[in-house]
Image (cartoon, helix red, strand yellow):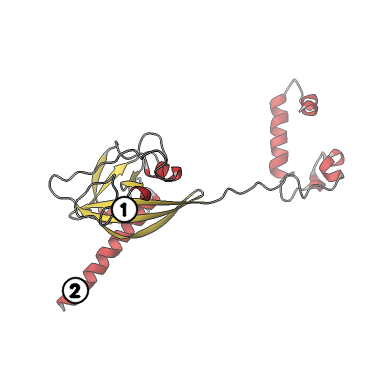
């Protein structure tokens, strides 16, 4: 740092900083530095000591984190209930299916203690990745009867892994809307939908398609 201060010109330090950034971006790259083109090659200590291949050392990779969530698809005829993630958390401002950490439920036939809807049953799983989080989502389906309610509650401290709490949170107090299921599967849709929600929609549409095929076969 002391040496660098001696080098920085007082009349135009911003140009000096920009030149250093350009040097690092175009010539002194971490993996394959172009020492033959470098104007500082003759005074470069790393080159003189033969260390250009080991400086800087590779950054330690962050270990992946396995996360299990439970999502519920509440159906009203051909529509499903979506919730808007809000509160400044992950995927803020995007529509999603209601989710909770899987560790909070599922009991027999129940999607989660945090989610209340009539007759919920597990219909499958989807897998999704966000940064280093490898997420497995158990998907439950329920019909929306008259007077039914769906609600979320804050997780008990220490009840489930912290990443699951963060990935599932943010929908409890946000807006909700009914959307036709067949609008959700396409990636070019007009709805700001999370990637996980789109995978859940495709799972539900696939199940509906298979059910239709079985029904047609039985009628024949």
Taking depth in this image into account, of 62 and 128 the one nearest to the observer is 62
Write down the residue under mark 2. Answer: 216
Report x, y in % for residue 152.
29, 41
> In the image, which disc is placed on residue 23?
none
Q: Which residue is mark 1?
A: 106
Say if residue 202 shows up in the picture. Answer: yes
Left or right: residue 162 compared with residue 146:
right
Label 1 near label 2: C-beta < 8 Å? no
Gap between marks 2 and 1, in whole Å? Answer: 33 Å
Q: Can residue 185 be seen?
A: no
* Quadrant in which the C terminus appears: bottom left
Viewer-proximal residue, 204 or 107? Answer: 107
Disc number lying in front (2 or 1): 1
- In the rendered view, does 172 fall on the left or right side of 14? left
Name the quadrant of the N terminus: top right
Number of marks in the rendered image: 2
**Image: 53 above or below 8:** below
Please name the residue shown 51% across and 49% down the image.
Answer: 132
User: Which residue is at 39% across, 39% downward?
Assistant: 92
Please provide percent x and percent y for residue 99.
Answer: 33, 47
Residue 169, image x and y in percent? 37, 41
Q: Earlier in the sequence, mark 2 or mark 1?
A: 1
């Amino acid at each position: 740092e002391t040496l660098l201060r001696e080098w920085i010109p007082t009349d135009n330090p911003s140009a000096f900083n920009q030149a250093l950034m350009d040097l690092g971006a175009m010539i002194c790259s971490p993996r394959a530095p172009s020492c033959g083109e470098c104007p500082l090659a003759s005074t470069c200590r790393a080159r003189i000591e033969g260390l250009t291949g080991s400086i800087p050392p590779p950054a330690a990779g962050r270990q992946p984190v396995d996360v299990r969530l439970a999502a519920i698809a509440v159906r009203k005829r051909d529509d499903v209930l979506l919730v808007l993630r809000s509160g400044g958390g992950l995927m803020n401002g995007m529509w999603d299916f209601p989710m909770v950490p899987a560790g909070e439920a599922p009991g027999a036939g129940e999607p989660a203690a945090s989610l209340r809807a009539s007759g919920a049953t597990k219909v499958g799983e989807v897998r999704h990745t966000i940064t280093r989080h490898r997420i497995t989502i158990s998907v439950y389906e329920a019909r929306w009867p008259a007077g039914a309610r769906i609600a979320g509650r804050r997780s008990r401290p220490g009840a489930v892994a912290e990443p699951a709490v963060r990935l599932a949170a943010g929908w409890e107090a946000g807006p909700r809307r009914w959307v036709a299921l067949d609008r959700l599967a396409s990636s070019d849709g007009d709805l700001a939908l999370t990637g996980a929600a789109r995978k859940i929609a495709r799972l539900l549409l696939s199940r509906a398609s298979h059910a239709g095929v079985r029904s047609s076969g039985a009628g024949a």
